[in-house]
Image (cartoon, rainbow, N blue to C red):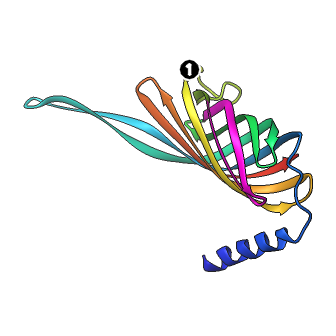
């Protein structure tokens, strides 16, 4: 683990000697990754003495983060406004189940090789209608999207980034949280 941290720090230092990225005009990124989706699992127990009680716990389902896309523009060399489409998914009983975010956000680059992003938007949770074997019943709600990422191979107009992303989604009485490790090509 210490070796990975040391390698990352050396990469960031080496990048500072290269040409600086041009954070101006149009920006965007296209990514894909690995994910875990924390979904609610309901249970009910009944007894003749206490009656019925229900409880909810969250179970993690491993899968992937399907293609994500951000499009936007720089309002300053350190801040961009973006539209973001992202999510996590897993497979259950022959169906691909998606937890998807469609919204707007702000991306902040405190230094050239590190960014933070946050947003709010519309959310959908349920079987993917293109790959599901059953009838589609999607839940709709709202979600937040948070990312922290590093530019690993940085150029003047392009980066390869690696980010951690959290997408908590809120659907009526349910909360679904997607966590992802995403590799992305970023341009500006």
Residue at left 69%, top 39%?
106
Report the span colored magenta.
Answer: 97-120
Left or right for 56, reference 4 = left
- Principal secondary structure, stretch drawn in magenta: strand
Q: Measuring from the top left, give residue 123's x and y in whole percent.
A: 59, 28
Where is residue 82, by image quadrant? top right
Considering the numbered disc 1 on the image, is that residue within a helix, a strand or a loop? loop
Q: Is residue 97 above or below residue 78?
A: above
Circle 1 crowding by C-alpha within 10 Å: few under 14, some 14–19, many from 20: few
Outermost residue to the left: 49
Q: Name the foreground residue: 75 vs 88.
A: 75
Outermost residue to the front: 76
Q: Measuring from the top left, give residue 1's x and y in whole percent.
A: 60, 76
Q: Name the foreground residue: 57 vs 8.
A: 8
Question: According to the image, label 1 marks what residue?
Answer: 137
Q: Name the foreground residue: 99 vs 119.
A: 119
Where is residue 131, by image quadrant? top right
Q: Is residue 103 above or below residue 30?
A: above
How many numbered discs, if any? Answer: 1
């Amino acid at each position: 683990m210490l070796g990975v941290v040391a390698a990352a720090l050396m990469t960031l230092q080496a990048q500072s000697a290269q040409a600086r990225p041009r954070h101006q005009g149009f920006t965007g990124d296209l990514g894909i990754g690995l994910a875990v989706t924390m979904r609610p699992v309901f249970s009910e127990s009944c007894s003749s003495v206490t009656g019925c009680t229900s409880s909810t716990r969250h179970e993690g389902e491993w899968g992937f983060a399907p293609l994500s896309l951000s499009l936007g523009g720089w309002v300053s060399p350190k801040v961009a406004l973006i539209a973001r489409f992202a999510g996590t998914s897993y497979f259950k009983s022959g169906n691909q189940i998606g937890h998807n975010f469609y919204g707007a956000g702000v991306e902040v680059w405190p230094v050239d090789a590190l960014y933070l992003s946050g947003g709010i938007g519309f959310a959908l949770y349920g079987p993917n209608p293109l790959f599901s074997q059953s009838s589609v019943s999607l839940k709709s709600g709202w979600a937040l999207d948070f990312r922290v990422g590093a530019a690993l191979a940085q150029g003047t107009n392009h980066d390869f980034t690696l980010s951690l992303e959290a997408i908590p989604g809120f659907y009526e009485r349910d909360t679904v949280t997607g966590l992802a490790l995403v590799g992305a090509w970023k341009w500006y």
